[in-house]
Amino acid sequence: MDMKVSASIKKGILEIICLLYILLFVYAAVSKLLDFENFQVQLGQSPLLSAFAGSVSWGVPLVELIIALLLLIPRFRFIGLLAAFSLMIMFTTYIIIILNYSSSIPCSCGGILENLDWTEHLVFNILFVLLAFTGIMLLLFNPKNVASKNHYNRTFGMVSIALLSSIAVVVIIFLLSEDITHHRNNFIRRFPHHPITKINELDLKHPSFYIAGIEKNKVYLGNYEAPLHVIVLDIGLQTQKSYVIRLSKSNLPFRSVEVRVQPPYFYLMDGTIPCIFRGNITDWKANLSMYGKVYFTKAEPFDSKTFVIRAISSKNHENVLGTITITDTIKVRLASQLLEKQIDGIFDTDGNLIYNEQLKKVLYTYYYRNEYLVCDDSLNLVLRGHTIDTISRAQIKVTTIDSKNQIKLSAPPIIVNKRTATFGNYLFVHAGLMGRYETEEMWDKSSIIDVYDFMKNTYLFSFYVPNLLNQKMTDFRIVEDVFVALYDHSIVTYKIRTNAYEPRGFKILHTP
């Protein structure tokens, strides 16, 4: 009688365990499939599974339904319980890695239990792991039978193998995903949880501003419509001062003036004349340093005497990088080997030119392809890096107008990289394309910044910079852990808060 009661209780417990797993997996799989796009986005933003989001998003619900079916059929129940045990071990290992080894922790686990925090989800998973283990033991172990004990030993060995194999699979996926994400990315971005927090906002009252320079405690703004006016803000956006630049020679035919501030000096440049003025920010008076020597389309100061430029080569009429050194004489050096022509040599090599003061490196990021150059201050190539999008060849169409001897774009180009900024060994790229598993809603409401360690040629993470009054940011800079975003009529400062970004080892350097 006792044996029958014991067998009946054991069978009842086993049925309850199987029923709980069937309900869990069917509900989980159906929930994922009904909200598949959101589930795929969550996996795409996972720091562990992002590189495999496509296959995992289909594989997990399919496996859950198969396991539920196996548990329904008594003759396949052992296989079903062992598979359920393995899958829950994988889920549990995933959470442990997220909590302890991931560079960022997503805001929720996703799935049907996303209202639980990570620790609560971990406890839930461990509970179901124990239930599966109990079910396996109840199904196969009979203490009155020696043969059953031997079978128990074999079963325990199988469970141990399943345990270790499941952990190993998740660890391998994690390591592979990290390698793919950082070095061989298939255009899946990694978004840490709340990486930036707003510090302050200031209404500038007028449009057409651009960021002319930045230092630890100050931001310098130039204005395209009033090219001699400079606004100086403290980094907290609490104080504001306006200055007017006074030029030693002001009757030049200015057409494309830009100001660069690199304390204690500032520079006023116009490559169409061409001319470069230099002055001191103590009085904002500028003297003419170069006039009529070399035309340029972009220029950035290295120091008070040397500039990196992008110009049009007189030999082949294509873009070329070079340097101008202004001493008693003016020396121009061109590095024609750096920019690689794909179509026309002008539009296809167009891009952002910036100078990294901390590491004394020149960075040039193409607009229309997934590539950037890192050079030393003598324009020797250090490396060619790649952004995470997949467009390696500029997708542009150009037309030659013979009557005017002009080359023009004949169709809107696909912009891969918009604007760039740098601090320390980091390159910040304002992305031009939406990545995989990203929502159009977030794309419309914000700008995406991709962050790279350009010295290691690795992608690190991305973050959203929200629109302001339905307007996307127009310019940005970074100083240490402060992100400065410029909008049409406003400027906003943010604090960067993520373990993936550690800029404190670098200081602001200025070379007289």
Image: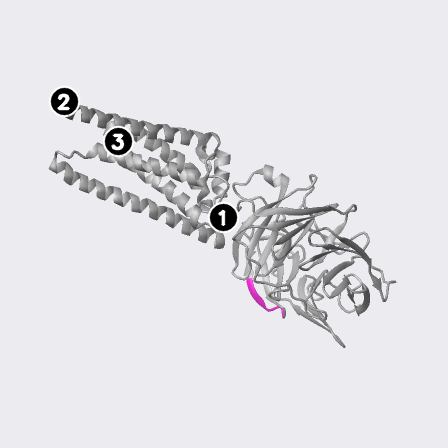
Find disc 3 in the rendering and name its residue.
77
Find disc 1 in the rendering and name its residue.
104
Residue 338, image x, y percentages:
61, 64
- State which tag comes first along the sequence, 2 or 1: 2
Magenta extent: 378-383
Q: Amino acid at mark 2?
A: Met
Decide whether residue 382 is among the magenta residues. Answer: yes
- State which tag comes first along the sequence, 3 or 2: 2
Circle 1: element type: loop
Spatial separation of the CA atoms under disc 2 and disc 1: 57 Å
> Would you call the spot at circle 2 few (<14 residues within 10 Å), some (14-19), or many (20 or more)?
few
Q: Residue at x 61, y 50 (%)?
A: 495
The reply, left or right, for residue 282 in relation to residue 389 is: right
Residue 201, image x, y percentages:
70, 46
The reply, left or right, for residue 274 in relation to residue 350 is: right
| On screen, residue 355 above or below 395 | below
> Would you call the spot at circle 3 few (<14 residues within 10 Å), some (14-19), or many (20 or more)?
many
Assign the N terminus to one quadrant of the image: top left
Spatial separation of the CA atoms under disc 3 and disc 2: 27 Å
Find disc 2 in the rendering and name its residue.
1
Determine which quarter of the picture holds residue 120.
top left
Residue 159, image x, y percentages:
26, 41
Q: Is residue 228 visible?
A: no
Decide whether residue 458 is among the magenta residues. Answer: no
> Would you call the spot at circle 1 few (<14 residues within 10 Å), some (14-19), or many (20 or more)?
many
